[in-house]
Image: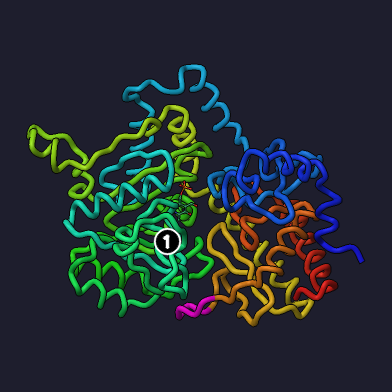
Amino acid sequence: MTTIQEVYRRLHPRSAKLHQEAVKTFPSGVTHDIRHLTPFPLYVDHALGSRKWDVDGNEIVDYVMGHGALFLGHAYPDITRAVQEQAAKGTHYGASHELELEWGGLVKKLIPSAEAVLFTSSGTEATLMAIRLARSYTGRDKLLKFDDHFHGWHDSVVGTRYGEPETPQSPGVPEATLSNTISVPQNDIAQVESRLAEGDVAVVILEPTGAHFGGLPLRDGFLTELRDVTARHNTVLIFDEVVTGFRVAPGGAQARYGVTPDLTTMAKILAGGLPGGAVAGKTDVMSLIEFRDDADWNRRKRVLHPGTFNANPLSAAAGVTMLSLVATGEFHTRAEAVTKQLVSGMNQALTSRDVEGCVYGLASYFHVSLGKECPRPQESIEWPARNGKAPPRTFPKAALALKQGMLNHGVDLMGYTAGLVSSVHTDEDVDRTLKAFEATLDEMLAEDLL
Ligand SMILES: Cc1ncc(COP(=O)(O)O)c(C=O)c1O
């Protein structure tokens, strides 16, 4: 029997060769942790719409979608045109420009918490800035985050490993910084309340649909309770909408659930597939970066806001085009209809093979949990246990086989077990994806991986 991994090697010889070259330059040969894949990652040559083509000529239905940035698919014509036109007019003026005004205006129009906006170059920079604003605003140091929630890679949000409160997620973070980051389990409002009652927590930050963009969904009511507790303790509440912003609704999770944070961090869809991030929120917090007619304020109290590529014209051109298009919600309708078909088809494939596991999601993302008892969504695509029970995790060996097996059949999942769907995925993509999933499940069963 040929294994999934043997087929992967056979179908991707040129990727293997490029990887051998890459390890001479990049540690492990990759430029982002999530692109690390055993035995080697895929090298992509070009992409269009919902598809990308690797260097071995394989055509792939893509659910990575630029790590979630490409809500309109690859090389969407309006965005390509806007970026080309802007590139010809200059990519950096080192000065203010009209497009940034339009871009910021669209953020204000769409995101309920956005009374004021500032731009950064990435989601990591956005959370860094939002946390600094919150600390300055409250005069406190502590940050409370939730286990497994990801907010980029700067020191303040590294935190500790899930279930291992003594183990930092990365070495290299000063003890003093780590000691200011408190990590508690999501959905446990009593722990949040008792920690906030100590009066030293500046800020609570979370992914507002749950850890790993909803891979571990929040229980019903948690966001409202969190809003209430943080307000009572004068702690700044940040919704990190880097993935959910403009995706789970044009106004993000806060619009979908009707809960307004003090600050919101954004990136990905915000910048239309180019680099870019933003913080938006209440004027009294955001105004900490304003210059005043007060030398002492400007020199000692004002929060700095530099950044060479903040609101650069190319990202602004792509971002304005993206946000103008997604504002109406029409593109969401299509992406969500596709996601629904995918979730229901994949669950049917599990049922018909009597394989334990489930596929669930929200709006236009989905998550696959394989190999353990897991309730399947019935009416909506959402994880049915809305009481805070977490979906089981797929064993790493099964997750790797799923990733490779799907690639062998022409489908690229986000990470190993998730998907970010765009508004340009077609019925044919759904068909191909479901066939790939069924074939991969059969191959995994044959290898005794499920
Ligand atoms: C919720 C969340 N916050 C922050 C970030 C960091 O964004 P960036 O990769 O643009 O620095 C990410 C990246 O995936 C994210 O998912």
Residue 307 place in picture, x, y as percent: 35, 34
Q: Is mark 1 within 8 Å of ligand 1?
A: yes
Give the residue drawn at x 66%, y 41%. Answer: 49
* Above-or-below relation of 23 to 414: above
Using residue 272 as the reference point, say whether residue 196 is left or right of it.
Answer: left
Residue found at x 43% / y 69% = 147
Start and end of the magenta stretch?
Answer: 385-390
Q: Describe the colour scheme in one phrase.
A: rainbow
Residue 426 image offset from top left, x and y in percent? 69, 49
Quadrant (top left/top right/bottom left/bottom right) for the N terminus: bottom right
Name which residue lies at 82% across and 64% down. 439
Q: Amino acid at mark 1?
A: Glu
Q: Quadrant of the C terminus?
A: bottom right
Magenta stretch holds residue 423: no
Residue 350: percent from left, percent from top: 73, 74
Q: Residue furthest right?
A: 1
